Amino acid sequence: MKFFREAALTVVCLVLGIIIAMQYRSVKANTTLAVYEQQRVSDLITDLLREQENNKQLQKRIDELQKDLENLRTGTNTENETIQGLRKEIEKLEILAGLKTVKGEGIIVTLEGIGNTHVEDSNILAVLNELKAADVQALAVNDERIIATSEIRQVGSYMIVNGRKLLPPFAIKAIADPEQLEKSLTVMAGVVDVLKYYNIKVDIKKDDNIIIPAVRDDGTTLRYDLLTPVD
């Protein structure tokens, strides 16, 4: 009798253990699922907010385009506004082509031979190339504007630039960030060190108001009579 009582008690305890274990696993699974669902909801909210912001920006751009379209339809873009826009664009192109006198901050690099040493065209070209690599926006040698078709040729002790005879010393004006321009020239074993090694005196001066004249439009520098535009 005692044996059956103990056996029954054992069976009851075993069943209770199984039930408790199953409930624990169920609670743990539900907890994990809840955390996952919470993270998923958070991610969805973030995605929703991002899409709402994108839609807001798109709607803003659509409104701008619709306004432009409406202006074109109603003719509120006056002839004067159109002409003013074209003038600004033309002025920009003239500046880039060197047809306008410009001013700005930058540096002036002066080259002069020491003793019997003459400044060579390669010396000037070396300085110009370094300045171009430093994102210079306008250049001139002894106030001769340097553009894409400018020639720099040595003839004895002087230079020919844009068809004009230039005598030393040679002052190279450059408009751009003066710190960046000076750094590009004065790096160790750079252009300045090489020029000094060959007895070329180099003077670099920063200036907040450098003026570079426009290229002369007398047919000696700008020639395009043999050019035909391609549609």
Image (cartoon, grey):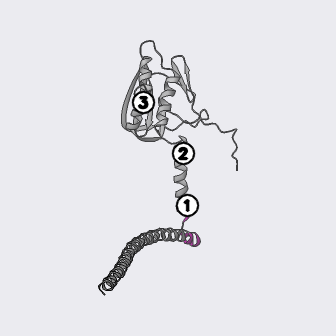
| Closer to us: 85 or 107 | 107
Count of number-bearing discs: 3
Q: Main secondary structure of the magenta part?
A: helix
Q: Of the residues shown, which amino acid type is indicated by label 2?
A: Glu
- The disc, 1 or 2, on the residue closer to the chain's N-terminal end is 1
Is residue 72 rendered magenta in the image?
Answer: yes
What residue is pinned by disc 1?
Answer: 82
Residue placed under numbered mark 2 in the picture: 94
Quarter of the image where one finds residue 198: top left
* Residue drawn 42% across the image and 33% down it: 184
| Residue at the extreme bottom | 1
Measure the C-alpha gap from mark 2 to mark 3. Answer: 28 Å
Q: Which residue appears at 42% of the width and 18% of the height?
A: 197
Give SS at disc 2.
Answer: helix
Q: How far apart, in angstroms, are the residues tagged by discs 1 and 2?
A: 18 Å
- The image quadrant that residue 154 belongs to is top right
Region rendered in magenta: 69-81
| Label 1: few (<14), some (14–19) or many (≥20) C-alpha neighbours in 10 Å | few
Q: Position of residue 87 (x, y in %)?
A: 53, 53
Q: Earlier in the sequence, mark 3 or mark 1?
A: 1
- Disc 3 versus disc 1: nearer the observer: 3
Position of 53 compared to 80: left or right?
A: left
Q: Is residue 114 above or below residue 11?
A: above
Picture residue at 37% right of the left edge, 37% below the top: 179
Point out the tag, 2 or 3, that comes first from the N-terminus.
2
Secondary structure under tag 1 reads: helix
Residue beneath disc 3:
185
